[in-house]
């Protein structure tokens, strides 16, 4: 990470784009692994490998987003160091929550695994416990999205104030932040789904592709970095 911090803003933006793209790709694998399993005790036991794959994919997504957060902090620090640091804080808190709830995703497999110490519970109680942890996973993911919403809002503002990225990307990231903030009210988020999810994903994907293909205007980044900081 120290070498990345010292890297030129051009390669830094493209590396961030690579990690951002990996976040999308691995998140897709996680969704396929978890979404293809019916919410029944038998399906959880039959598709153990898919549950493990989803758990591993979730952790990889978190690691990739941590890298994106660190790189974006360095990239946008010349715009406003305090806001860039605040954005990194929200991003890392969201990542920490997402990493923690990964274990809720794995818990039903353990609960329904037939371990001897679980014999004090009957079958109905075990199924109820398994589904409770899945519900915790969903609720925790919604909380993480709220923090990512604040993160995207701040990144959108920093892009808009920057001179080295086009302002329309800042507008798109602002829409992404607003989309993720709908999860402050789960009923509202469910009512707006899947449109809020599409807006957030497409906005972040636009920034990802721009970082990968176009990068940043290095000279303007250097000019802004050499100017008096806010």
Image: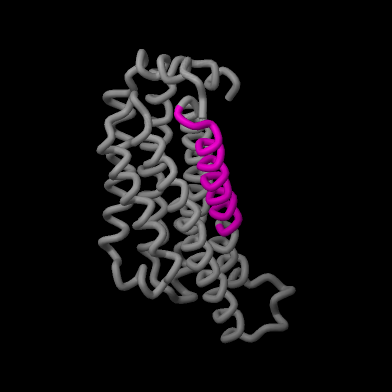
21 left or right of 129? left
Q: Residue at x 51, y 61 (%)?
A: 143
In magenta stretch: residue 92: yes
Which percent across, then down, holds residue 69? 50, 37
Q: Residue at x 36, y 44 (%)?
A: 24
- Magenta part of the protein: which range? 79-101
80 left or right of 197? right
177 left or right of 74? left
Which percent across, then down, holds residue 207? 32, 37
In magenta stretch: residue 62: no
Q: Using the image, determine if residue 162 lies above or below residue 151.
A: above
Give the total number of marks visible in the rendering: 0
203 left or right of 100? left
Q: Residue at x 56, y 81 (%)?
A: 128
Q: Using the image, determine if residue 226 lies above or below residue 158.
A: above
Determine which quarter of the picture holds residue 192.
bottom left
Is 131 in front, or is 71? 71
Which percent across, then down, holds residue 27? 40, 49
Which percent across, then down, holds residue 140? 53, 63
Q: Using the image, determine if residue 58 lies above or below residue 131.
A: above
Viewport quadrant of the N terminus: top right
Q: Residue at x 38, y 64 (%)?
A: 182
Is 154 in front, or is 176? 154
Dominant SS type (magenta): helix
Q: Using the image, determine if residue 131 lies above or below residue 212.
A: below
């Amino acid at each position: 990470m120290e070498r990345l911090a010292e890297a030129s803003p051009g390669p830094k933006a493209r590396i961030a784009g690579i990690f951002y793209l990996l976040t999308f790709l691995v998140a897709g694998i996680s969704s396929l692994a978890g979404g293809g399993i019916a919410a029944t005790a038998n399906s959880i036991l039959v598709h153990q490998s898919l549950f493990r794959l989803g758990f591993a994919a979730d952790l990889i997504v978190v690691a990739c987003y941590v890298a994106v957060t660190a790189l974006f902090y360095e990239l946008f620090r010349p715009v406003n160091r305090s806001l860039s640091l605040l954005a990194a804080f929200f991003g890392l808190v969201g990542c920490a929550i997402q990493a923690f709830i990964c274990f809720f995703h794995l818990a039903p497999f353990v609960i329904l695994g037939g371990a001897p110490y679980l014999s004090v519970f009957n079958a109905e109680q075990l199924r109820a416990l398994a589904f409770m942890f899945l519900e915790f996973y969903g609720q925790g993911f919604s909380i993480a999205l709220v923090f990512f919403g604040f993160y995207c809002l701040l990144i959108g503002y920093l892009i808009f104030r920057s001179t080295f990225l086009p302002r329309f990307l800042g507008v798109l990231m602002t829409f992404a932040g607003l989309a993720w903030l709908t999860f402050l009210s789960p009923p509202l988020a469910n009512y707006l789904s899947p449109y809020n999810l599409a807006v957030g994903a497409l906005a972040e994907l636009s920034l990802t592709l721009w970082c990968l293909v176009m990068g940043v205007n290095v000279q303007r980044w250097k000019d802004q970095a050499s100017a008096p900081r806010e």
